[in-house]
Amino acid sequence: MYTPFGHLSYCSNIHAGENWGEHFSQLKKYIPAVKAQVQPDAPFGIGLRLSNLASLELSKEPALEEFRDWLTTNDCYVFTMNGFPYGGFHGERVKDQVHTPDWATAERVAYTIRLFRILAALLPAGMEGGISTSPLSYKLWHRCVEEHNAVMESATLNMLLVVEQLISIHRNGGPLLHLDVEPEPDGVLENSKEYIDWYFQHLLPAGVMMFGEKFGMSEEEAIAAIKQHVQLCYDVCHFAVSYEDPLVVLERLHYFGLRIGKVQISAALKALLPKDGGRQQIVDAFKDFNESTYLHQVIARRSDDKKIHYPDLPEALADAENMDVEEWRAHFHVPVFVKDFGVLSSTRDDISRVLARQAAKPFTRHLEVETYTWDVLPQGLKQEMGASIAREMKWVLQQLELS
């Protein structure tokens, strides 16, 4: 939905359905109900997630036309999409396979171009659209320097093939579309430093050469086009797990002239780990969130401020007696309207700081709530999904209006 602070929605990756028919039925069930609670009298924006299978089905004109008609009838519009998970995302083990296929593959290129063509067909006139995507690949798949460098090079060149399409669409009178790269712990790009280094050391040099040859662009024109069409997806949970101060990140990106295509509004779990009494109680509380579907990377802060990266929550739990560790932050998207979970807390304060900055000095046009874990939350935290989504969006609106 449009607000004075940008377009706000929630990501439909919260809803099951890996084929289009199943996912569309979930949208029909929940979107009108959430809209009625949050913004009944104005158009309601949708953050759409399509699996590869669903994208193939929706790209066919009869299905696309039916969806357009439904959007019009229900006073809704699509302005952003989530192109990170390619395959199944509910009811099966996802873990590191959320990165499959990675950007080193032709499958990821074809999928992403297809999503952009769908988005271009759905976007309201005059509106820009963005699609968030994976941070190139999963770092733990490429442990030696040679493998890492090879996947970095091939992934970058493949991503530029998508950018080439976006430039052509815009030059031919189509909408402005941007690919929003989403760093996360253990991604090949997992924090602001790695993202900026990649942008200037890999993406821009390769893109300047490619677009000079393809479009006859000068270096300055190519850099401007790349910065327009490749932006950052700032997932607040991910950056909080990496202990990055949101205002420092925003200033750093501004300094380098890099744009933020979308903010994914999400909160992580965190807790201080005392060396004496109470440590086991905290560890036991984290165990309640140890589930088998999604990756829950943990970054621990030691007493000397150095960090320990655990690929998943079980590895952190196995090292719970490490007395050098003072804090855990876990990649588990928890409801944004809850600050404390018993002895655990969330990184919700980072969301408040990001939204306050957006209200005071807007830096993006797209805001998307992304709590996709309702099905795997501990039993006591599960609530009716539609009411929970509406509650999250109302909390975000309240934060923006109070800023």
Image: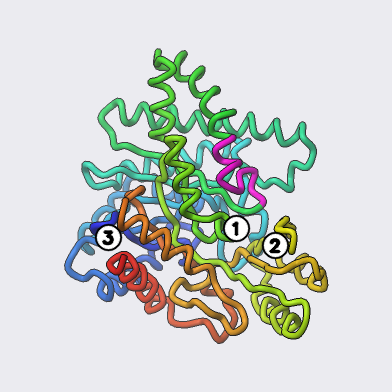
The reply to whether dot 2 and dot 1 touch (C-beta < 8 Å) is: yes
Q: Alpha-carbon distance for marks 3 and 1?
A: 31 Å
Image depth: mark 3 or mark 1 in front: 1
Q: Position of residue 145 (x, y in %)?
A: 77, 35
Q: Position of residue 304 (x, y in %)?
A: 74, 59
| Type of amino acid at the residue the image marks with label 1 | Tyr
Left or right: residue 129 compared with residue 327: left
Give residue 301's mark.
2
SS of the residue under disc 3: loop
Residue 103 vertical placement versus 352 (above, below): above
Is residue 8 found inside the magenta-colored segment of the image?
no
SS of the residue under disc 2: strand
Give residue 356's mark.
none
Query: Where does label 3 land, which residue?
Result: 1
Residue extending furthest toward the left: 41
| Type of amino acid at the residue the image marks with label 3 | Met
| Type of amino acid at the residue the image marks with label 2 | Arg
Mark 3 Cα shell of 10 Å, populated few (<14), some (14-19), many (≥20): many
* Residue at horizontal 59 percent and vertical 38 percent from the top: 103
Q: Quadrant of the C terminus?
A: bottom left
Mark 1 Cα shell of 10 Å, populated few (<14), some (14-19), many (≥20): some
Which segment did they paint magenta? 186-197
Decide which of 254, 18 is in the foreground and name it: 254
The reply to whether dot 2 and dot 3 touch (C-beta < 8 Å) is: no
Decide which of 164, 298 is in the foreground and name it: 298
Query: Where does label 1 land, which residue?
Result: 243
Image depth: mark 2 or mark 3 in front: 2
